Amino acid sequence: MKFFGCISLLLLASSAVMADMSRVTLYKRPDDELIAAHLKRERDTLYQMLNMKQDDTATSIAIAAAVDSRHLSSLRGSAQKAESITIKDYANAQYYGVVEIGSPPQSFQVIFDTGSSNLWVPKAGCTHCGNPFFGKKNKYDEDASSTFHEDGSDFEIMYGSGSVKGYFSLDDVLLADDIVINGQKFAEVTDAGGLGLAYSLGKFDGILGMGFTSISVGGAPTVFENAIKQNKVDLPIFSFYLGDNGPGELTFGGYDSSKFEGDLKYVHLDAATYWQITLDGVKSGDYHKESSDKITAIVDSGTSLITGPKADIAKLATAVGAKANIMGEYTIDCAKVDEIPDIVFTIDGTDYPIPGKSTVIQAQGTCLFAFMGMDFPPPGPQWILGDVFMREYYTVFNYHDQTIGFAKSKK
């Protein structure tokens, strides 16, 4: 969708740094928590196996269900509720920041997610939305906002373990203290049970999707699309800098050249749904993935790990010395982390290496290989380049030109 005249990449490169930019601090969930969640999943699955009384075939089916319960088997390809299917449940999400809704503003911690397109937060009285003792959530109170307007149409997203339900409303949304989007359509969630413990224990209240309206539930225009339409940003771009052991930064309306080295290299999108691009190949050690067929990938700030086809991830894990557990996740001997070879993604003729040590999330004596095998049938992507990739590369998302720019992040 075109909102104003053509902006060339040359003009963008020269002017974006000087544009009037707004920034949101992104806070990082500690690696200890992510590893603890990994270990809990492993323990729960082992317990489930030990207590099964069914025959071997039933046991195998149950284990497979446990492994895949956090993920959907298809991406927008299902005839049933195809418009509401999402690709993850945020169990491994690591970065979150503040958005405010209403007048006076009500604050929420949200995951700014390039892998989805809706804004949703829990409403007052929401069920399965944390509890008073742990995982307490901030909840939206429509009666407390003078700019609230009723919509009332149903909202539902189906996750691997269930659905998140609610209804749509309209209100003003405040980003980065100075960008006010008027009359934004968003969802008040009445039941978040479909996200399970990933939500109950998570540090986030809701999700702010930054994909394209083409995949938005209910066809609701995205927050950023409305910011462009309402002339609230100088340029139709936003940029992510993900801190490694500290906060990151999300910039609206420009990018910050002090956060990266060299020049940005832009890649055109393969599809303006998710931020989907094509890969030339993936390689590490003895593993080389190239294909005459198109290799698709989405750049996804809402996924912590990198995912790829199960067969490819198994080969890649073997090449770096990682071993699978019963959950389909991979660990590696912490004493051998320094020996892990770089993993290189080739995009539009340029190599983007991830240092071996950066492919491991380490805590509590466990070294989790930050790659996971997941198979999505068409039209879903084959690879998801999550936070592990985005920590290495400053990433600029151009909504107008439908491109993504990459440059090596400064540590």
Image (cartoon, grey):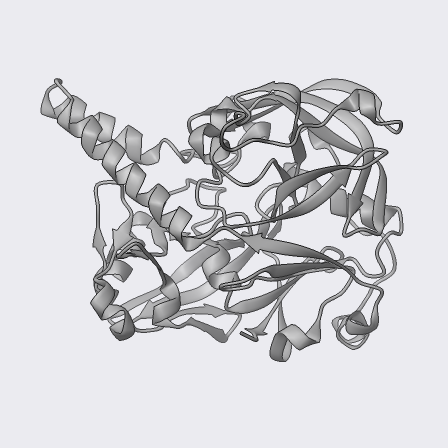
Extreme residue in the bottom direction: 262
- Which residue appears at 49% of the width and 46% of the height? 93
Q: Would residue 11 be seen by someone viewing this image from the given angle?
A: yes
**Which residue is rendered at x = 76% and y = 57% of the image?**
400
Which residue lies at the image location 83% right of the left edge and 68% below the top edge?
Answer: 19
Q: Nearer the viewer, residue 296 or 397?
A: 397
On screen, residue 244 versus residue 165, left or right, reads: left
In terms of image quadrants, where is residue 16? Answer: bottom right
Residue sitting at 77 percent across and 76 percent down?
A: 10
User: Horizontal and vertical percent for residue 274?
Assistant: 59, 47
Left/right placement of residue 363 relative to residue 265 reads left
Tell me: residue 174, above or below residue 275: above
Q: Is residue 164 above or below residue 374?
A: above
**In the image: residue 309, left or right of residue 165:** left
Write down the quadrant of residue 41 in the picture.
top left
What x and y, as percent, mark residue 39? 29, 43
Q: Based on the displayed image, in which of its 4 quarters is residue 6 positioned? A: bottom right
Query: Residue 378: percent from the left, percent from the top?
Result: 46, 41
> As displayed, is residue 304 above or below residue 108?
below
Residue 285, position as x, y percentages in the image = 27, 72
Q: Nearer the viewer, residue 267 or 95?
A: 95
Q: Nearer the viewer, residue 211 or 245?
A: 245
